Amino acid sequence: MTTASPPTHSSQTTLVLASASPSRAALLGRLADAFEQQTSHVDETPRPAELPATLAARLAREKCEAVSSSRKSTDEPLVVIGADQVAGRDGTRLGKPGNAKRNVSMLRSCSGKTVVFYSAVHIIDTRSGRSLSHTDITRVRFRTLSADEISHYVDHEKPWQCAGGFKVEGRGISLFEIVESTDPTGLIGLPLIFVSKALRTFDLC
C-alpha cells in the first residue's frame, strides 16, 4: 500500500483508490489533495461469455469491496474507489496486450475500426454502507494505420499494459480519427465527472 499524503478529509474519512495505477492516481489527484492507494489483488479472469461492460463493472465492484473488506478491522471511516476498464471490438473483448508483439498485432486488428471502451467505477462509503456505480462508454475510431506507424508507436510508448494497447494521454491520441465520449477522462481510466459527483455526495469534494 502506498500513501499519496496524509488524509485530511472531513470527519477524518480516508479516501482510498483501490488501484496501483499511476494514471488513475494522477486523475484522482485532480479532485483530492490526499488519498491512499491500495492494490486489491482481485482475479481479473473473465467469466465464460462475459460481456466487456459486465466484466468492467464486476471488476470495479470486486476491487472496491476487496479493499473495503481488508480494512474492516481498523474501524476507520473510508470512501473506497474501485475502477476497471475493458475494451471491445465487434463484440470481442480486447485485453492488455502484455508484450510488444501482441501490442502490434492488437493495433493492426484495430486499424480503421471502432473500439468501445467501458470504464467502470464503484465507490463505497463505509460510514453509511452506501455505494454508487457508473460505467462510462467511449467510442474510438482508429485511423488506417501503417505497419511502420504501429511499430514506431509501440516502440516509443511501450503501452502493452494498457487496455487496447495505447495511452491516450500520450502519443496514442495520434492513432485516432475521432473519440466520442461524455467524459474525456473516462478513456484514461477514471471518469472524473462521475467521481466528482460521488465525492460531493459523500462530502469529500
Image: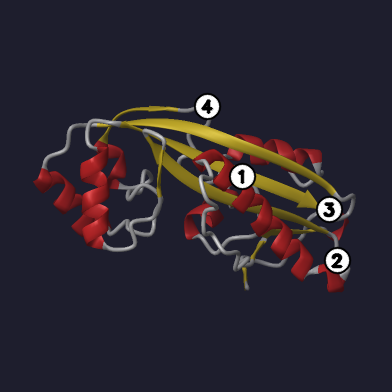
Question: Where is mark 3, residue-wise?
Answer: 10
Checking the image for residue 112, the label placed there is none
Mark 2 or mark 3, which is nearer to you? 2
Give the mark toward the camera: 1 or 4: 1
The image quarter in which residue 172 lies: top left
Looking at the picture, tell me which residue is in the foreground, 9 or 100. Answer: 100
Residue 191, located in which quarter of the rendered image? top right
Instruction: Count the labels in the image.
Output: 4
Secondary element at tag 1: helix
Disc 3 on helix, strand or loop? helix
> Would residue 150 be found to the left or right of residue 86 on screen?
left
Task: Indicate the amino acid at tag 1.
Answer: Ala
Q: Is residue 196 above or below residue 178?
A: below
Asked if 193 appears above or below 199 in the picture, the reply is above
Precedes in sequence: disc 4 or disc 2: 2
Amino acid carrying label 3: it is: Ser
Dot 1 corresponds to which residue? 57
Q: Residue at x 26, y 57 (%)?
A: 102
Q: Which mark is residue 76?
A: 2
For marks 1 and 3, give the CA distance.
28 Å
Front label number (4 vs 3): 4
In the rendered image, residue 140, in percent from the top left (x then y), is placed at 36, 32
| Res. 188 in view | no
